[in-house]
Structures are given as structure tokens and as C-alpha cells.
Image (spheres, helix red, strand yellow):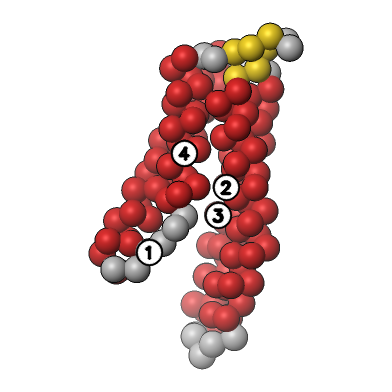
Amino acid sequence: MKKNIPVLIAGVIMAFTSILHLTGGQVDHVVPLLASELDPTDKAVLLGVWHMVSVALMIMAFWLIRQGLKPIDKRIDAMRFIAWLNLLFALVFIAVSIARWSFAPQWILFLPMGLLVLYGLKNKTEVPV
């Protein structure tokens, strides 16, 4: 059995990110907004979108870890999609940080994941186990 180590590392980082998003991120960012005077509909949308991102992170973590442990060529397009999605997420947070003059550190996680997946796909760095 062979493994794609860069993709596996990206999957582990993604799993960590999804746990961090569900626990620390919600407590620090969502709970205070839900306790605010925002419109109830806005609160519902905020909470829904927050958990949509959580679901996306968990799905990406699952697929990256799966592909990292057992690379299958038929999954290359899905892996490329995940890589570019992460790179675009990073660019969004970089742009928002610049536009708002406020540091949004999420790009620090998304950028390496996207680059690791592209690197793993390009070099197919597989190692025998």
C-alpha cells in the first residue's frame, strides 16, 4: 500500500481546522453575535452558514485523509477541486484582511492545505508502507 504524504498532511490539518472551527471559533465569534441585538433571521443565517462551513471542512478532511492513505487516480479531479477551493479561501481572507485593515488569520491554514494538495498531486509523492 502506498501513501501520498502531502495530501495526508493536508487532510490532518483540515481535520484539525474543522475541530477548531466547531469549538473555538464558534465560542469566540458566533456565540457573541447570537447574543447581540442582530435580527433573528440574520442570527439564523449566520449560524447556518457557520455550520455549512463546518460540514465543508469535515468533508474535505475525510476525502484528503482517504486519498492520502490510499491514493486513487480517479479522485484526482476532486483533490484538485479541494486544493483550489482552499487556495481561493485563502485569497478571500487575505483580500478581506487588506480591505478591512484587520488581520483575518484563517488564510494561514487554507493556503498550506491547498499548496500541499497540489504538491502531492504534482509529484505523486507516494511511499511504500
Q: CA distance from mark 3 to mark 1?
A: 20 Å
Element at label 2: helix
What amino acid type should be assigned to the residue bearing mark 4?
Pro
* Residue at x 57%, y 35% (from the top left corner): 10
The quarter of the rendered structure image containing the N terminus is: top right
Q: CA distance from mark 1 to mark 4?
A: 17 Å
Q: Are marks 3 and 1 in contact (CB under 8 Å)?
A: no
* Residue at x 49%, y 85% (from the top left corner): 39
Q: CA distance from mark 4 to mark 2?
A: 17 Å
What amino acid type should be assigned to the residue bearing mark 1?
Phe
| Most foreground residue, 79 or 21 | 21
Element at label 3: helix
Residue at numbered disc 3:
53
* Residue at x 60%, y 58% (from the top left corner): 21
Q: Are marks 4 and 2 in contact (CB under 8 Å)?
A: no
Residue at numbered disc 2:
56
Q: Are marks 3 and 2 in contact (CB under 8 Å)?
A: yes
